[in-house]
């Protein structure tokens, strides 16, 4: 009887640990994207421009080409208006969770679609942008931004 009770408690404990481990929630600003992925870099870039107003972070996540373009606009507000062609007062940014075929760990280029949902002058604004990235030195860097979806 004692052995059965011990086995039952052990089984319950292991089951409980497995179930709680599977319910892991991410609290990072980039949603479900893992660090080191193109999705993470794309969302971090947009967060730097919109929510953090951190031009230095946006520059750090950019290729030389994009860095020159961003530097010419001096502020994140100007970069929002001219590079992203989207203006927001408050915005939520999420990467496309579409089914990716292939292994990004071996890719040198990636295109990530970001969903922007927020407000500007108290009006709701929702839009998409394609972020084109290149892998440089093992890091994903933003090379250009486009609004063509096909």
Image: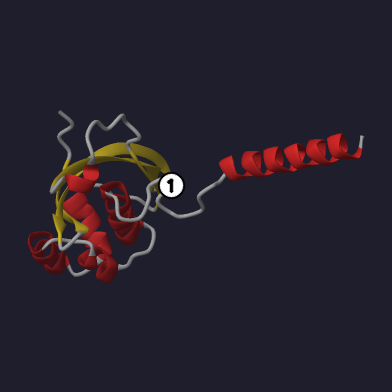
Residue 99 appears at what percent x and percent y?
31, 29
Residue 57, relative to residue 106: is it above or below?
A: below
Q: Closer to the camera, 147 or 140?
A: 140
Mark 1: which secondary structure? loop
Q: Residue tagged by mark 1?
A: 31
Q: Is residue 101 left or right of residue 71?
A: right
Residue 71, relative to residue 11: is it above or below?
A: below
Kindly indicate the quadrant of the structure image that contains residue 113: top left
The residue at the point 32 percent across, 36 percent down is 96
Residue 22, relative to residue 65: is it above or below?
A: above
Residue 85 makes an appearance in the image = no
Residue 127 appears at what percent x and percent y?
30, 37
> Which quadrant would the N terminus be assigned to in this image?
top right
> Which quadrant would the C terminus be assigned to in this image?
top left
The residue at the point 26 percent across, 68 percent down is 55
The residue at the point 39 percent across, 48 percent down is 121
């Amino acid at each position: 009887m004692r052995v059965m009770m011990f086995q039952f408690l052990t089984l319950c404990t292991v089951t409980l640990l497995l179930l709680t481990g599977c319910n892991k929630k991410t609290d990072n600003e980039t949603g479900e994207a893992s660090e080191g992925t193109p999705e993470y870099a794309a969302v971090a870039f947009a967060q730097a421009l919109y929510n953090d107003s951190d031009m230095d972070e946006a520059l750090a996540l950019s290729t030389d080409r994009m860095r020159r373009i961003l530097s010419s606009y001096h502020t994140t507000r100007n970069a929002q208006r001219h590079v992203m062609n989207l203006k927001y007062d408050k915005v939520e940014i999420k990467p496309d969770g579409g089914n990716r075929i292939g292994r990004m760990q071996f890719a040198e280029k990636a295109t990530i679609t970001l969903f922007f949902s927020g407000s500007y002058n108290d009006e709701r604004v929702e839009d998409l942008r394609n972020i084109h990235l290149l892998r440089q030195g093992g890091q994903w860097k933003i090379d250009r931004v486009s609004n063509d979806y096909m």
